[in-house]
């Protein structure tokens, strides 16, 4: 692999390892022990970018053209996510100077609370993690329509019960501390009036009656992507509490401009 070859090159002596010139045993040991880790890294990159990297066993020449081609394949995913995020920000009416969907989600939340409005979580932009999964599925569907075959499990889908289901996000639907403070007292059903459902959360073990098992608002019975794709909270439990002052100070001027524009 390219990473393996780079490690080998960095540890060669004047004569090279293959010529049996003097090389410290500790250096060779470090190189050998690192091989498993580099293989894991390469496999992770393959899964992320949907590319395959040839191994040194195949005696592939790691030329500049191959390095460039592999780099372009990996960058393709970043371009898809960056352009898709800009589209989502424009769709939600974000100012052009805001390039983070998590930031705009936070600003929208703060604006609603400052105006003493009831926050409609379904109207907030999705988190970055949820948006990325959605954008991957959009790209996959476009490529399929063009006749290009891609592995759906590398593009926002998961194989479950002999069928494909969308990956809503790779993060929890809400911080664990928050989930443990929100519960419902529904006696049956847990339908539209359920306190958990209103904030976009599934019922959990702390719910008084259903305990997250005996109702319709449990994860195993939910396949609607919109339920928690755009209703999930930011994954860091201290985001709104411990870091609120720091974030507010950092974005103060930008936030004031946003209020003036709206």
Image: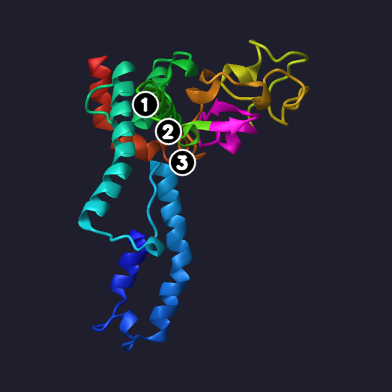
Q: Nearer the viewer, residue 56 or 224?
A: 56
Q: Can residue 5 be seen by looking at this rendering? A: yes
The spot of residue 86 in percent (x, y) is 28, 26
User: x%, y% of residue 221?
Assistant: 67, 21
Q: Measured along the vertical axis of the image, is residue 30 above or below residue 152?
A: below
Q: Which residues are magenta?
A: 158-180
Horizontal side of 257 relative to 154 (left or right) equals left
Find the distance from the CA under tag 3 to the CA under tag 2. Answer: 42 Å
In the depicted view, which residue is nearer to us: 221 or 62?
A: 62
**Mark 1 to mark 3: distance in Å?**
43 Å
Q: Which mark is residue 143?
A: 1
Considering depth in this image, is 31 or 211 the residue closer to the camera?
A: 31
* Mark number displayed over residue 195: none
Measured from the top left, where is residue 224 in percent x and y? 56, 18
Q: Which residue is mark 2?
A: 150
Q: Considering the image in quadrants, where does the N terminus appear? A: bottom left
Per the image, the residue denoted by label 3 is 242
Nearer-N-terminus badge (1/2):
1
Q: Callout 3 environment at 10 Å: few (<14), some (14 to 19), or many (20+)?
A: few
Q: Secondary structure at mark 1?
A: helix
What is the CA distance from the residue labelled 1 to the residue labelled 2? Answer: 8 Å
Q: Earlier in the sequence, mark 1 or mark 3?
A: 1
Callout 2 secondary element? loop
Q: Residues within 10 Å of mark 1 (few under 14, many from 20)?
A: few
* Between marks 3 and 2 in the image, the one whose residue lies nearer the viewer: 2
């Amino acid at each position: 692999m390219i990473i393996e070859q780079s490690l080998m090159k960095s540890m060669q002596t004047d004569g090279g390892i293959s010529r049996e010139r003097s090389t410290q045993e500790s250096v060779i040991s470090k190189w050998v022990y690192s091989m498993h880790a580099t293989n894991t890294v390469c496999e992770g990159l393959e899964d992320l970018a949907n590319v395959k990297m040839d191994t040194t066993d195949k005696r592939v020449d790691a030329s500049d053209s191959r390095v460039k081609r592999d780099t372009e394949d990996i960058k393709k995913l970043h371009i898809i996510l960056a352009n898709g995020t800009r589209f989502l920000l424009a769709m939600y009416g974000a100012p052009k100077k805001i390039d983070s969907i998590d930031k705009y989600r936070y600003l929208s939340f703060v604006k609603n609370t400052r105006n003493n409005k009831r926050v409609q979580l379904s109207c907030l932009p999705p988190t970055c993690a949820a948006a990325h999964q959605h954008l991957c599925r959009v790209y996959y569907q476009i490529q399929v329509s063009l006749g290009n075959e891609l592995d759906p499990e590398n593009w926002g889908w998961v194989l479950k019960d002999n069928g494909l289901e969308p990956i809503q996000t790779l993060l929890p639907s809400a911080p664990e501390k928050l989930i443990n403070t929100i519960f419902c007292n529904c006696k049956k059903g847990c339908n539209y009036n359920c306190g958990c459902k209103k904030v976009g959360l599934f019922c959990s073990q702390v719910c008084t009656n259903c305990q997250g098992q005996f109702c319709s608002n449990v994860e195993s019975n939910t396949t609607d992507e919109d339920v928690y794709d755009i209703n999930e909270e930011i994954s860091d439990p201290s985001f709104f509490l411990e870091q609120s002052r720091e974030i507010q100070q950092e974005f103060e001027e930008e936030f004031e401009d946003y209020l003036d524009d709206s």
